Amino acid sequence: MATTLSAQSLTDRQKHLATIAALEAQGDLVRLEPAILAALNGGVTINEVKEAFSQLYAYTGFPRSLNALGVLNKVLESGNPNWIEGKPWTRPALWDNAQKALAVGTEIQTKLSGRPFNYAFCPQNDYYLKAHLFGDIFAGDQLSAADREIVTVAALSALKGVAPQLAAHKAGAVNMGNTQEVVDELCKFLSDKGLSQCDASADAQAGAWPKGNPNDVYAQYFTGNSYLAPIQPKNLTNGEKSVASYANVTFEPGCRNNWHVHHGAHQILICVSGEGIYQEWGKPAIRLHAGDIIDIPEGVKHWHGATKDSWFQHLTSHVHVGDPESNEWLEPVTDEQYNEAHK
């Protein structure tokens, strides 16, 4: 029976484990190397790092697991005597008893899920989950069950398209011994560090671009919550003005702005994450995905926002065309118009 951690905030050790897990999942080997160095220098043991990367093959695939272990091996070549090897690795006895591995794995899976889980639709995967993932892999003694869920939540947070699994493991992380406060802080930590594809307060994609702050100044012109992160070109010095303005806008599921018109500028939307909708007055709505670009002519009445079930991010640029620039905010997009745009 796992014991709930008494700490109400993430420890430095947990932050290191979460960081290397997220970078392993993203396959970002360039950032992973210094993150491993920081983890080892921060007291995470070599064998704990090995165990974390080994476990993650079940969630992120063998290629990313092996690549991460390769980076660890490269880091270890420097032979820093201050790094801690950790408890010696020993072969789990459970590996020699398939029937017991299935029984133990079933028990662990039930505890993690909060209820019995039987995937009768695909008996193969049901067996792999119980006997191998929660049996063989969880039998290792380098990481606690609570540690393992920190690693798993961090890795799944870094991946797109796994919101159901992430939601299950965020709940499972509490069932396996972490406090809810620790799990919430973990998600915020990953989001703040740019290591998460999900919003810290919801199991949905919000993208790798900075989410920014609540868009309070323009909230009256939005249905639902949005977030704004202004972007400043790096080559401009103090006092220099750009020919265009830039920002990243994040919409929560169901959020959209009012109908509006840009005067004195045309707007460019570059979609970077999630799924959104753009519509010009009198024209059919257009679905938007990462990589799509919309160039909105000056004076065209339009709206844009997220779909009902997805976060959405786009970069926006207003390119001046000579006349004084202004936004003319108009009526909200009605529920009927919004629902029609989904068809």
Image (spheres, rainbow, N blue to C red):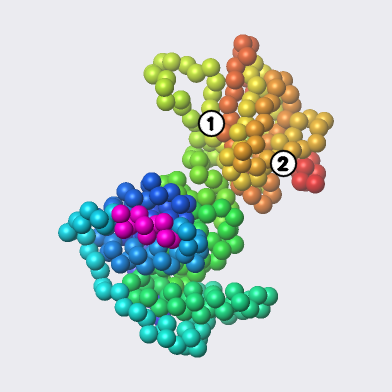
Q: Is residue 16 visible?
A: no
Q: What amino acid type should be assigned to the residue bearing mark 1?
A: Ala
Which image quadrant for residue 324? top right
Q: Quadrant of the N terminus?
A: bottom left
The residue located at (51%, 84%) in the rendering is 102
Can you identify the residue that label 2 sits on?
A: 287
Q: What amino acid type should be assigned to the residue bearing mark 2?
A: Arg
Provide residue 49's location: percent of width, then percent of height.
34, 63
Which image quadrant for residue 92? bottom left
- Cα distance between the residues tagged 2 and 1: 21 Å
Residue 220, compared with residue 308, is above or below; it is above
Q: Which mark is residue 247?
A: 1
Provide residue 186's location: percent of width, then percent of height.
42, 57
* 223 or 165, nearer to the observer: 165
* 224 or 72, nearer to the observer: 72
Magenta-highlighted residues: 65-74
